[in-house]
Image (cartoon, grey):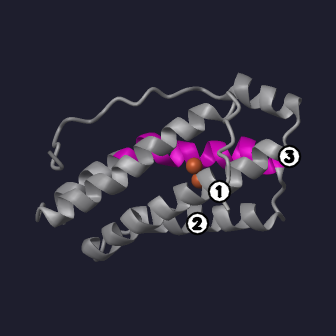
Amino acid sequence: MKVKPIKRHKAIQPLSREHHQGLLLSWKIRTGLSKGVSTKRIKTYVDWFYTTYLAPHFEEEEKHLFPILGKDNAMVKKAVAQHRRLDRLFKSTTELNKSLNRIEEELEQHIRFEERVLFNEIQKMATEQQLQFILEHHIETKFSENTTDSFWE
Ligand SMILES: [Fe+2]
Ligand SMILES: [Fe+2]
């Protein structure tokens, strides 16, 4: 069965746009590893991306979006557990090769889950007031690339 994609409400669009940069992070890690770039170089970029964009993104979702379904919702529980696990992987400083491989894989899976399942459900369940609240409280962070060491090029 083909599922027609749901058009994102404009309140959720900024978070969806941030997912694009997240998927690009996975691609950069994959590319770096396959080109034999040192894990230390990759990790430096990954740390910057996590602190600057991804950690605030997780926080925003947990603070404003997930409460629409409630913390006991199974899909929300799954997403929060994925955030916790990714947070541990990003903060891990040993076995870099292993943790970078895990981040690459699990971040992509997490974003696909939100885009294909969770965000659709949230949009379906949210009231217009809830969406309006998100719209008014989201501070759009414009992505500005860190070009100190573009190892993926
Ligand atoms: Fe998330
Ligand atoms: Fe997300």
Q: Which residue is mark 2?
A: 82
Mark seen at residue 125: 3
Q: Which residue is mark 1?
A: 2
* Three-letter amino acid code of the residue under disc 3: Met
Mark seen at residue 12: none
Which residue is at a point 62% across and 54% down the rendered structure image? 116
Which of the two residues, 84 or 4, is positioned nearer the viewer here? 4
Can you tell me whether the CB of the residue at mark 1 lies under 8 Å from the nearest atom of ligand 2?
Answer: no
* Three-letter amino acid code of the residue under disc 1: Lys
In this image, 88 relative to 62: left or right? left
Residue extending farthest top? 136
Residue 78, image x, y percentages: 68, 68
Residue 1, image x, y percentages: 68, 62
Q: CA distance from mark 1 to mark 2?
A: 27 Å
Q: Is residue 26 magenta?
A: no
Which residue is at a point 73% across and 60% down the rendered structure image? 76
Residue range highlighted in magenta: 49-68
